[in-house]
Image (tube, helix red, strand yellow):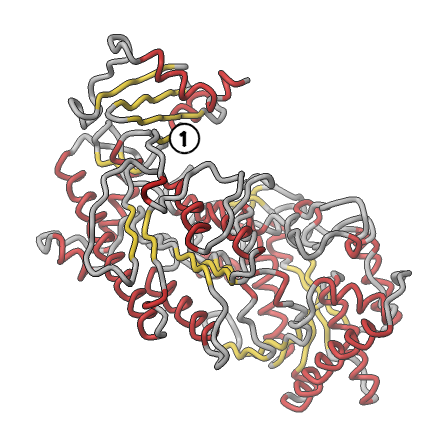
Amino acid sequence: MLSEKRVLISEVLKRAGITTAGFHSNPYLSAYFGWNRGWDVFYDSMEDEVDDKVPYIKAGEINNKVSTWLSSHIGGIAGYNPFFLWVHYMDVHEPYVPERKYIDMVDPSIKLNEEEMFGLFKDVLLKRDVSDRGIVEILKKLYCAHVQEIDDAVRKFFGILEKSNVLKDSLIIITSDHGDEFGEHGGLSHDGKMYSELVNVPLIIYEPSRERGEVCDTLVSTLDIPPTILYLFGLNQVDAFEGCSLLPLEDYPAKGVFGEAVDKHGSKEKGEEKEVHYYLQGDLKIIYLETDDSWELYDLRADPKEINNIIETSSAAEEIKEKVKPRVRRYHG
Amino acid sequence: MAIDRQISEKRKRQCSKFVELSKAIIREAFDKFEYEELGITWTGGKDSTLTLWVTRQVCQEKGISLPKAMIIGEGDEFEEIEEFVKKFKKDWDVPLEICRNDDVLKAANYTLSAPVRVKDLDERNRAELKRIGFDGEEFPFEAESQVGNHLMKTVVFNQFLERNNIKGIIQGLRWDEHPARFNDEYFEHKEMAHLVPEHTRIRPILHFTEKDLWDTYAAFNIPYCTLYEQGYRSLGAKTTSLKGSDIPAWEQDLENTEERGGRRQDKEKAMERMRQLGYM
């Protein structure tokens, strides 16, 4: 359940008079868990029928709902109220049963039908069985086919804004909540581990006035996105948000980033929720597992795959542990 | 029992307008369908009781009695609702049919959470399970799990339509009761489908917010079930409805808190989706 104490970006914006609309199909973010706070329009798909092979409303249909809402919002002759639109596509998610044309874009030699793909989900992915490298590769390609689907959906989303003549006035932030593992650390899917394949997500900002793209390699966090949105709307920052606005660029403080999750396997083993935390600063990444009160430290420059734990040998270990401890319930009591 | 609360004259006029709009929908329903083809769903809850009350107003104006009404007995009822329904069935002269899925109740030995074996069910119920993709051998008897909801409510509802040849069914849904309802229409035609008869759903009180509804109850002295006084805001099956607070529903912060916060059906749905996505 979303804590009552959490402040959502939707709540802050709505209070400031901005129209807020959210469209998604993620049960974790549904009204039931409390994520419908602060929205003028909130669609979470939970009343709609889905099936086992595609257990969410697909991106194309989410786009249709966005399009209908957008036309009604900007339809008046008197101009429209500034809006914040949140769209979350579920399609890059198991059970990896993408449409044929997207599979063909990735690897046309994959001839699996829907039943067979769903079979891989049940018999391999759900069991976290990485013993057959060939099958894991196929799963990864199916995942990539879903990425193609999302590229298409994002293209269409831009088209919707363009058709409504609001693209030229829109700033668009594209990001994600997590990646998936394909055996990099012995598992599949996303089980609350803190390695790069799961926690490194894209962050793309589209600004209509920019003529060409630029790549920025500063270390930032998704926590920085809500403060950035407030900055863009010209609103005051709120204390409840932990991140820092990415803009203006020159004011962005160099800092490390934190992440945390529930350790799925540890929690299952211990029968209660166990935390996992990480902190990354420069090239050093530290991970804390509450399950067995253990630490891992990796030098990402020398060891980008995060294989060699140097917690016992690194001279920086003790200092960097102190950064994480205030966030760990065992240490902050 | 009626709410003892003063409503300003201005607010009363607003509530009257909401009621008039609902009456217009019901009059339209009487124009579109033969009297015998119309039905009403009643649960004893606040939405369906308001709907019944408004329908009764129109019937009185026309000098006719209420169309056939149904109430679903899901095997997990509040005694307070049963008493309320019993009293107003008599006072308002409601031609009420109590509809149950007796086959399932019997298979569960009339005991909540008891396992129901699919092979003990009749052909119709087995076909219904197949229709919703349930392929297990047994399920626990609960009114608001996905399977329970389908067999105990949806199936019973469809059978009521079939048995009475109902073409238009009046229901007490509201736009603000759930975000997913914002697109619902006053009249929605449903095509015939496998095990579902063709019918039209008529929703005359869609425009009432929860606050409008309680103000209307107070303004027109409409009776309601005492559970709302104890703090319930949304009533479903007894074991899965929770009180949000100990103060009467209409005194709670209706605009900033969840009307259906105490209902388990939404949890069931979220859990089912998470399972399908490979979590748990």
Looking at the image, residue B57 sits to the left or right of residue A179; the answer is right
Q: Position of residue A127 (x, y in %)?
A: 30, 34
| Residue in the picture at 56% in, 67% down | B182
The quarter of the picture where the N terminus of chain A appears is top right
Find disc 1 in the rendering and name its residue: A260
Q: Amino acid at mark 1?
A: Glu
Q: Quadrant of residue B215?
A: bottom right
Q: Quadrant of residue B251?
A: bottom right
At label 1, counting other C-alpha atoms closer than 10 Å, the crowd grade (few under 14, some 14-19, many 20 or more) is some
Residue, x 57% and y 63% (percent of image)? B154
x and y, in percent, of residue B144 in the image: 60, 51
Answer left or right for A81 relative to B239. left
| Chain letter of the residue carrying label 1 | A
Question: Horizontal and vertical percent for residue A252?
Answer: 35, 39
Residue B63: image x %, image y %?
83, 88
**B275 vs B74: above or below:** above
